[in-house]
Image (cartoon, rainbow, N blue to C red):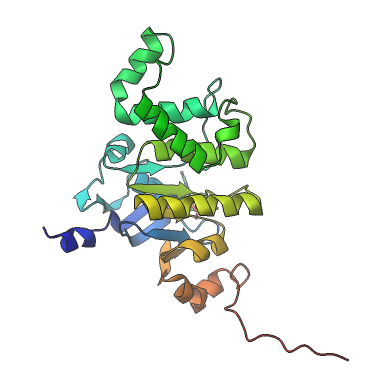
Amino acid sequence: MTEQERDAVPALEAHGITVTFGGLTAVNNVDIRIMSGKIVGLIGPNGAGKSTLFSVLSGLLRPRSGQVLINGEDVTHASPQQRAHRGMARTFQHPELFLGLTVREHVVLAYRVAQTPRRIWTDMVTAGGFRPSSRAENERVDLIISGLNLTDIQHRPAVGLPLGLARLVELARSFAREPRFLLLDEASSGLDAAETEELQGVLRQMVERRGVSLLMVEHDVEMVLGMADYVYVLDFGSLIAEGTPEQIRTNADVRAAYLGEQIDAPPAAPAVEVTA
Ligand SMILES: Nc1ncnc2c1ncn2[C@@H]1O[C@H](COP(=O)(O)OP(=O)(O)OP(=O)(O)O)[C@@H](O)[C@H]1O
Ligand SMILES: [Mg+2]
Protein backbone atom coordinates (compact mmCIF):
# COMPACT_ATOMS: atom_id res chain seq x y z
CA MET A 1 0.00 0.00 0.00
CA THR A 2 1.43 3.40 -0.87
CA GLU A 3 1.37 6.23 1.63
CA GLN A 4 -1.34 7.96 -0.38
CA GLU A 5 -3.52 4.87 -0.44
CA ARG A 6 -3.08 4.43 3.30
CA ASP A 7 -4.02 8.05 3.89
CA ALA A 8 -7.17 7.54 1.85
CA VAL A 9 -8.52 4.87 4.24
CA PRO A 10 -10.71 6.62 6.80
CA ALA A 11 -9.61 6.35 10.43
CA LEU A 12 -13.20 5.49 11.25
CA GLU A 13 -16.02 4.67 8.90
CA ALA A 14 -19.59 3.44 9.21
CA HIS A 15 -21.74 2.09 6.36
CA GLY A 16 -25.49 1.64 6.26
CA ILE A 17 -25.97 1.84 10.03
CA THR A 18 -29.54 1.19 11.15
CA VAL A 19 -30.66 0.95 14.77
CA THR A 20 -34.23 0.26 15.85
CA PHE A 21 -35.80 0.36 19.30
CA GLY A 22 -39.08 -1.54 19.06
CA GLY A 23 -40.98 0.20 16.29
CA LEU A 24 -38.75 3.29 16.28
CA THR A 25 -35.93 3.65 13.76
CA ALA A 26 -33.46 5.74 15.76
CA VAL A 27 -30.73 5.60 13.09
CA ASN A 28 -31.67 4.96 9.49
CA ASN A 29 -29.07 3.69 6.98
CA VAL A 30 -26.37 6.21 7.90
CA ASP A 31 -22.90 6.42 6.31
CA ILE A 32 -20.13 8.51 7.84
CA ARG A 33 -16.35 8.77 7.40
CA ILE A 34 -13.71 10.35 9.59
CA MET A 35 -10.44 10.91 7.78
CA SER A 36 -7.18 10.86 9.68
CA GLY A 37 -6.21 14.14 11.33
CA LYS A 38 -9.58 15.78 10.68
CA ILE A 39 -12.29 17.18 12.89
CA VAL A 40 -15.73 15.85 12.01
CA GLY A 41 -18.93 17.14 13.59
CA LEU A 42 -22.21 15.31 14.08
CA ILE A 43 -25.14 17.58 14.84
CA GLY A 44 -28.92 17.34 14.80
CA PRO A 45 -31.96 18.36 16.82
CA ASN A 46 -33.04 16.54 20.00
CA GLY A 47 -33.81 12.87 19.41
CA ALA A 48 -32.14 12.89 15.97
CA GLY A 49 -30.11 9.76 16.77
CA LYS A 50 -26.70 11.31 17.52
CA SER A 51 -26.06 9.48 20.78
CA THR A 52 -27.34 6.23 19.33
CA LEU A 53 -24.94 6.47 16.38
CA PHE A 54 -22.14 7.40 18.78
CA SER A 55 -22.83 4.24 20.81
CA VAL A 56 -22.65 2.15 17.65
CA LEU A 57 -19.28 3.69 16.73
CA SER A 58 -17.84 3.23 20.21
CA GLY A 59 -19.10 -0.35 20.49
CA LEU A 60 -21.73 0.00 23.22
CA LEU A 61 -24.59 -0.78 20.87
CA ARG A 62 -24.88 -3.34 18.03
CA PRO A 63 -26.58 -1.95 14.94
CA ARG A 64 -29.44 -3.88 13.37
CA SER A 65 -27.52 -3.59 10.12
CA GLY A 66 -24.41 -1.93 8.80
CA GLN A 67 -20.68 -2.05 9.40
CA VAL A 68 -18.15 -0.10 11.44
CA LEU A 69 -14.53 -0.02 10.21
CA ILE A 70 -11.39 1.25 11.92
CA ASN A 71 -8.62 1.89 9.41
CA GLY A 72 -10.49 -0.30 6.96
CA GLU A 73 -10.82 -3.21 9.38
CA ASP A 74 -14.30 -4.45 10.31
CA VAL A 75 -14.92 -3.90 14.03
CA THR A 76 -18.73 -4.13 13.97
CA HIS A 77 -18.61 -6.97 16.49
CA ALA A 78 -15.59 -5.75 18.47
CA SER A 79 -16.02 -4.65 22.09
CA PRO A 80 -15.21 -1.11 23.25
CA GLN A 81 -11.94 -2.49 24.72
CA GLN A 82 -10.95 -4.07 21.41
CA ARG A 83 -11.68 -0.76 19.68
CA ALA A 84 -9.54 1.01 22.27
CA HIS A 85 -6.63 -1.25 21.31
CA ARG A 86 -7.07 -0.03 17.75
CA GLY A 87 -6.66 3.58 18.87
CA MET A 88 -10.18 4.66 19.76
CA ALA A 89 -10.89 6.70 22.87
CA ARG A 90 -14.14 8.29 23.91
CA THR A 91 -15.28 10.67 26.57
CA PHE A 92 -18.53 10.35 28.45
CA GLN A 93 -21.15 13.05 28.62
CA HIS A 94 -21.06 12.74 32.41
CA PRO A 95 -17.45 12.37 33.49
CA GLU A 96 -16.97 9.22 35.56
CA LEU A 97 -14.28 9.98 38.09
CA PHE A 98 -13.03 7.84 40.96
CA LEU A 99 -13.60 8.86 44.53
CA GLY A 100 -10.33 9.35 46.39
CA LEU A 101 -8.04 9.75 43.37
CA THR A 102 -6.48 13.09 42.57
CA VAL A 103 -6.55 14.67 39.14
CA ARG A 104 -2.99 13.52 38.50
CA GLU A 105 -3.69 9.98 39.68
CA HIS A 106 -6.54 9.73 37.19
CA VAL A 107 -4.15 10.60 34.38
CA VAL A 108 -1.44 8.25 35.67
CA LEU A 109 -3.95 5.42 35.94
CA ALA A 110 -5.19 5.94 32.38
CA TYR A 111 -1.60 6.05 31.12
CA ARG A 112 -0.70 2.81 32.90
CA VAL A 113 -3.81 1.02 31.74
CA ALA A 114 -2.81 1.86 28.18
CA GLN A 115 0.84 0.82 28.67
CA THR A 116 0.47 -2.30 30.82
CA PRO A 117 -3.16 -3.22 31.31
CA ARG A 118 -2.51 -6.28 33.45
CA ARG A 119 0.07 -4.82 35.78
CA ILE A 120 -2.19 -2.06 37.00
CA TRP A 121 -4.64 -4.34 38.76
CA THR A 122 -1.87 -6.36 40.36
CA ASP A 123 -0.46 -3.11 41.70
CA MET A 124 -3.77 -1.92 43.03
CA VAL A 125 -4.70 -5.24 44.60
CA THR A 126 -1.45 -6.70 45.88
CA ALA A 127 0.84 -3.74 46.40
CA GLY A 128 -1.87 -1.74 48.09
CA GLY A 129 -1.66 1.27 45.81
CA PHE A 130 0.33 3.05 43.17
CA ARG A 131 3.90 2.08 42.45
CA PRO A 132 6.15 5.10 41.88
CA SER A 133 6.13 6.72 38.46
CA SER A 134 8.96 6.23 36.00
CA ARG A 135 10.59 9.32 34.53
CA ALA A 136 9.03 8.74 31.12
CA GLU A 137 5.63 8.43 32.72
CA ASN A 138 6.09 11.59 34.77
CA GLU A 139 7.14 13.56 31.71
CA ARG A 140 4.20 12.37 29.66
CA VAL A 141 1.71 12.99 32.47
CA ASP A 142 3.20 16.47 33.12
CA LEU A 143 2.82 17.33 29.47
CA ILE A 144 -0.83 16.30 29.36
CA ILE A 145 -1.66 18.05 32.62
CA SER A 146 0.04 21.31 31.70
CA GLY A 147 -1.44 21.18 28.18
CA LEU A 148 -4.90 21.18 29.73
CA ASN A 149 -4.02 23.85 32.33
CA LEU A 150 -4.60 21.40 35.16
CA THR A 151 -1.22 21.89 36.88
CA ASP A 152 -2.57 24.00 39.72
CA ILE A 153 -5.24 21.50 40.66
CA GLN A 154 -3.39 18.26 39.88
CA HIS A 155 -3.21 17.17 43.52
CA ARG A 156 -6.84 17.92 44.29
CA PRO A 157 -9.37 15.08 44.46
CA ALA A 158 -11.07 14.85 41.07
CA VAL A 159 -14.49 14.11 42.50
CA GLY A 160 -16.26 17.33 43.41
CA LEU A 161 -14.55 19.50 40.79
CA PRO A 162 -16.79 21.87 38.86
CA LEU A 163 -18.10 20.35 35.62
CA GLY A 164 -15.77 22.38 33.36
CA LEU A 165 -12.71 21.04 35.17
CA ALA A 166 -14.10 17.52 35.41
CA ARG A 167 -14.47 17.57 31.61
CA LEU A 168 -10.82 18.54 31.26
CA VAL A 169 -9.81 15.68 33.58
CA GLU A 170 -11.87 13.33 31.42
CA LEU A 171 -10.04 14.62 28.35
CA ALA A 172 -6.66 14.30 30.08
CA ARG A 173 -7.43 10.65 30.71
CA SER A 174 -8.34 10.03 27.10
CA PHE A 175 -5.15 11.82 25.94
CA ALA A 176 -3.10 9.60 28.28
CA ARG A 177 -4.27 6.62 26.27
CA GLU A 178 -2.58 8.17 23.21
CA PRO A 179 -5.60 7.67 21.00
CA ARG A 180 -5.46 7.90 17.24
CA PHE A 181 -9.02 9.06 17.21
CA LEU A 182 -11.25 10.46 19.81
CA LEU A 183 -15.04 10.48 20.02
CA LEU A 184 -16.47 13.33 22.07
CA ASP A 185 -20.00 13.07 23.39
CA GLU A 186 -21.39 16.55 24.05
CA ALA A 187 -18.01 17.72 25.33
CA SER A 188 -19.17 21.31 25.68
CA SER A 189 -22.51 20.73 27.43
CA GLY A 190 -22.69 22.49 30.77
CA LEU A 191 -19.59 24.57 30.07
CA ASP A 192 -19.65 28.37 30.11
CA ALA A 193 -18.34 30.45 27.21
CA ALA A 194 -14.80 30.74 28.58
CA GLU A 195 -14.59 27.01 29.33
CA THR A 196 -15.93 26.17 25.87
CA GLU A 197 -13.28 28.36 24.31
CA GLU A 198 -10.56 26.69 26.34
CA LEU A 199 -11.85 23.28 25.34
CA GLN A 200 -11.78 24.26 21.67
CA GLY A 201 -8.16 25.38 21.96
CA VAL A 202 -7.14 22.11 23.61
CA LEU A 203 -8.88 20.02 20.97
CA ARG A 204 -7.36 21.96 18.10
CA GLN A 205 -3.89 21.45 19.58
CA MET A 206 -4.55 17.76 19.94
CA VAL A 207 -5.38 17.51 16.25
CA GLU A 208 -2.57 19.77 15.05
CA ARG A 209 0.23 18.42 17.25
CA ARG A 210 -0.67 14.74 17.43
CA GLY A 211 -2.60 14.18 14.22
CA VAL A 212 -5.54 12.78 16.16
CA SER A 213 -8.91 12.54 14.38
CA LEU A 214 -11.92 13.87 16.24
CA LEU A 215 -15.60 13.14 16.04
CA MET A 216 -17.64 15.71 17.95
CA VAL A 217 -21.26 14.96 18.77
CA GLU A 218 -22.61 18.29 19.89
CA HIS A 219 -25.62 20.32 20.81
CA ASP A 220 -23.55 23.45 20.32
CA VAL A 221 -23.96 23.91 16.57
CA GLU A 222 -21.83 27.04 16.45
CA MET A 223 -18.94 25.25 18.14
CA VAL A 224 -19.07 22.49 15.53
CA LEU A 225 -19.42 24.86 12.59
CA GLY A 226 -16.49 26.87 13.95
CA MET A 227 -14.16 23.89 14.42
CA ALA A 228 -15.01 21.01 12.12
CA ASP A 229 -13.53 20.30 8.71
CA TYR A 230 -16.63 18.35 7.76
CA VAL A 231 -20.09 18.09 9.29
CA TYR A 232 -22.89 15.51 9.21
CA VAL A 233 -26.46 16.46 10.11
CA LEU A 234 -28.96 13.91 11.41
CA ASP A 235 -32.69 14.48 11.69
CA PHE A 236 -35.18 11.78 12.74
CA GLY A 237 -32.46 9.16 12.33
CA SER A 238 -31.50 10.03 8.74
CA LEU A 239 -28.65 12.09 7.36
CA ILE A 240 -30.20 15.20 5.88
CA ALA A 241 -26.95 16.95 4.95
CA GLU A 242 -23.17 16.64 4.98
CA GLY A 243 -20.45 19.00 3.90
CA THR A 244 -18.15 21.80 4.98
CA PRO A 245 -19.38 24.16 7.70
CA GLU A 246 -20.13 26.74 5.01
CA GLN A 247 -22.25 24.27 3.04
CA ILE A 248 -24.09 23.27 6.20
CA ARG A 249 -24.69 26.86 7.28
CA THR A 250 -26.46 27.66 4.05
CA ASN A 251 -28.28 24.35 3.59
CA ALA A 252 -32.05 24.85 3.48
CA ASP A 253 -32.90 21.43 4.97
CA VAL A 254 -30.58 22.04 7.90
CA ARG A 255 -32.03 25.46 8.57
CA ALA A 256 -35.53 24.00 8.42
CA ALA A 257 -34.61 21.21 10.87
CA TYR A 258 -33.36 23.80 13.33
CA LEU A 259 -36.10 26.30 12.48
CA GLY A 260 -33.25 28.66 11.64
CA GLU A 261 -32.75 29.40 15.31
CA GLN A 262 -29.42 28.01 16.29
CA ILE A 263 -27.51 28.70 13.14
CA ASP A 264 -26.28 32.20 12.51
CA ALA A 265 -26.82 33.49 9.00
CA PRO A 266 -23.63 33.99 6.97
CA PRO A 267 -22.22 37.46 7.66
CA ALA A 268 -24.33 40.06 5.86
CA ALA A 269 -23.09 43.31 4.37
CA PRO A 270 -22.32 45.78 7.15
CA ALA A 271 -25.37 47.73 8.23
CA VAL A 272 -25.45 51.34 7.23
CA GLU A 273 -25.49 53.55 10.25
CA VAL A 274 -28.51 55.78 10.24
CA THR A 275 -28.26 59.06 12.09
CA ALA A 276 -31.33 61.09 12.74
N1 LIG B 1 -32.45 2.72 24.70
C1 LIG B 1 -33.45 3.25 24.01
N2 LIG B 1 -34.67 2.67 23.96
C2 LIG B 1 -35.68 3.20 23.26
N3 LIG B 1 -35.60 4.32 22.55
C3 LIG B 1 -34.43 4.97 22.56
C4 LIG B 1 -33.29 4.48 23.28
N4 LIG B 1 -32.25 5.34 23.09
C5 LIG B 1 -32.71 6.31 22.29
N5 LIG B 1 -34.01 6.10 21.97
C6 LIG B 1 -34.82 6.93 21.05
O1 LIG B 1 -34.11 6.99 19.83
C7 LIG B 1 -34.19 8.31 19.26
C8 LIG B 1 -32.81 8.87 19.10
O2 LIG B 1 -32.27 9.13 20.38
P1 LIG B 1 -30.81 9.69 20.61
O3 LIG B 1 -30.60 9.74 22.07
O4 LIG B 1 -29.83 8.93 19.79
O5 LIG B 1 -30.94 11.16 20.02
P2 LIG B 1 -29.94 12.41 20.16
O6 LIG B 1 -29.78 12.97 18.80
O7 LIG B 1 -28.72 11.98 20.88
O8 LIG B 1 -30.80 13.42 21.05
P3 LIG B 1 -30.33 14.53 22.10
O9 LIG B 1 -29.90 15.71 21.29
O10 LIG B 1 -31.58 14.83 22.87
O11 LIG B 1 -29.22 13.97 22.94
C9 LIG B 1 -35.08 9.10 20.21
O12 LIG B 1 -36.39 9.06 19.71
C10 LIG B 1 -34.97 8.36 21.52
O13 LIG B 1 -36.13 8.54 22.29
MG1 LIG C 1 -27.82 12.60 22.67
Q: Nearer the viewer, residue 138 or 195?
A: 138
Locate residue 35: give its quadrant: bottom left
Residue 205, x across and y down, in percent: 45, 52
Judge whether 119 appears above or below 147 on screen: above
Residue 196, x across and y down, in percent: 59, 52
Judge whether 34 appears above or below 120 on screen: below
Residue 50 appears in view: no
Q: Nearer the viewer, residue 110 or 47?
A: 110
Quadrant where the C terminus sits is: bottom right
Q: Is residue 66 left or right of residue 228?
A: left
Residue 275 appears in view: yes
Locate residue 232: give its quadrant: bottom left
Q: Residue at x 30, y 29 (%)?
A: 115
Q: Residue at x 55, y 34 (%)?
A: 151
Q: Outermost residue, left direction?
A: 1
Q: Residue at x 11, y 57 (%)?
A: 1
Q: Is residue 21 left or right of residue 225?
A: left
Locate residue 219: give its quadrant: bottom right
